[in-house]
Amino acid sequence: MRFLPDVTRRGFLGSLATGPALGLLSVSASAAEAQNADRATVDSDKFSPIDLAGHYSASSVDFRVSNRPAELAPDSLRTPAGPIRLRGIPFLFGDRRAANKDWLAVSQADRSDTRAEVEIPVGRTAAFVCLAHFCDWPSERGEDPDPDRFEPVGEVIATAVLIYEDGSEEVFPIRRRFEVSPPSIPWGHFSFTAAPGSDAVPKPLDGSLERGTDWGGLQTGFFDNVYRPPILWLCPLKNPRPDRSIAKIRLVAAGQATLVVCGLTLCHRQQHPLRYERLSTYRLTLPDESAADFERWTIEVDLGVIARQYVLPPFEPTSWLKADWAGLGESKGATPPGARFRYLEIAASEAATLSVTDRSSGAVRKFDLCDLNPGNPGTRLEIVDRQKVWVRGRILDEAGRPTPARLSFRSSEGRYIPPYGHRAEINTGWFQDYGADLKVGRSSFAYLDGTFEAELPVGEVLVEITKGFEYSPVRQRLEIRPDTRSIDLILARWIDLRAKGWVTADTHVHFLSPSTALLESQAEGINLVNLMAAQLGDLFANVGDLPGGALASRDGEHLVWLGTENREHLLGHISLLH
């Protein structure tokens, strides 16, 4: 029997993930329509869109893709016209108004609007050849409408042949669910080596909603727009001979299935344009005179996504360590309206460029993320926490045993670093975030069972730990080395009220699940928690937990007791502790 090598909390949670973590998103705009509005000048050092006008054989207006699902409207496959950027890659789509044709379609089927083979002149070198395309649905859909019943994954739809000036060739298969997929897909039916032209869009927790029922999706930090047809699949084919000039590209149909090519672009950078690096934090330093105007600057990245951007309130580590309100949170105070340092959390290709536009003057400053020089004067960009290490940690009591507690890591500039499995941005709205996290003022904390994993920056890290009123709160400075793999944090108990016959209790708690309430009670040193089921209009909170009864910790020192809250206009809230 073989066991999984990664038995960490991080590995376990990662194996359960059903949606992309924000650090893995590969997105640059909300949808093709939004990107079509940005017809920026093509960076010829990065890309060369190829004009396919002489090779179009079909029109997006009247083309009929075989086996189209009945629920998809006939006109839903119309694509944008002219210059367009998809995930930051520029393409030149056909304009059906000019020639009534805007698609290059290849198939061996007997159709007037497809070709069995097409050759496209190129005459340039390229590191990648990027196709924006889609294929028809598998023929089995017509016999069995269930998309999960059967799908010919790996079916070769066509081949792309790079023909070099010296006559040599490289052949790439265009396979179903690998390099290409249909223009509409069931949930989760993504391609292995191609990406949709539009994808999830970062959304702040306080972002607006079209429908109140979208609230749950907002908690993920992004909205998923990939399923809106037509889905154009982007497939960068890596050229194994980037130093040789490509004379032409030949597209050859492999069978009756149809491949529709809407755009073709040469990518000249050696870095994969759609392979995004891990989410990293950058610090953008703005000129002094702009500090008072937060809206003066427009910040964008071409081959990536800016997941968050924010400013930090003033923070001085030495004063923070000496402060006498450890564990009690910091007052929110006023966030500077336009601090000089802007923090950006970015997931992007190594070939990405960050653009900073001064709205007042129109001046644009660009930064290549793979070649940052923090010494530049004026506006400059630098990566924060260039080196990080994964650390396993324990919070120990005076007997050396792991004990639940509330913990917060901070960087030297005051950024909250959550342990793995805890979110960086905590939702403080009513009945909106009932996970094992807490925000007190502007201080964020994670509730832990005494063990944790965290990715910490090499260098100085600040930590704050608290466990109710019977333990002395801890604030200390840690030095994380490149070879640090584990840390132990010690809590000292200054008084044992339980041994003196006292019981600490919180008699009015709502919304938490019983198990989360038990964890938080242990971390806060509370022996008894009365979790109240309640009716608030159409909301019945924790009613489903009542039949389960009380929940106790293993040592019997902490108990979550289910009760009910009953409200009356004169007597107020009456808690029945069943």
Image: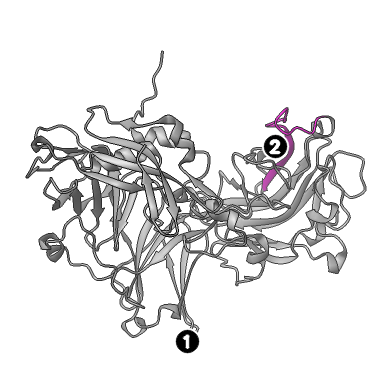
Helix, strand or loop at mark 2? loop
- Viewer-closest of 66 and 515: 515
Magenta residue span: 144-163
Q: Which secondary structure dominates the residues rendered in magenta? A: loop
Residue 51: quarter of image = bottom right
Farthest top residue? 1
Mark 2 highlights which residue? 176
Please tell me whether residue 310 belongs to the stretch shown in magenta.
no
Residue 520: quarter of image = top left
- Disc on the earlier residue, 2 or 1: 2
Residue 86 x/y as whole percent: 62, 59
The amino acid type, in three-letter code, at marker 2 is Arg
Quadrant where the image shows the N terminus: top left
**Is residue 104 visible to us here?**
yes
Left or right of 1, for residue 70:
right
The amino acid type, in three-letter code, at marker 1 is Ser
The residue shown at (43%, 61%) is 308
As displayed, is residue 562 above or below residue 262?
above
Left or right of 340, for residue 320:
left
Mark 1 highlights which residue? 361
Q: Which mark is residue 321?
A: none
- Viewer-closest of 546 and 177: 546
The residue shown at (82%, 33%) is 139
Left or right of 164, for residue 483:
left
Quadrant where the image shows the C terminus: top left
Cβ–Cβ under 8 Å for marks 2 and 1: no
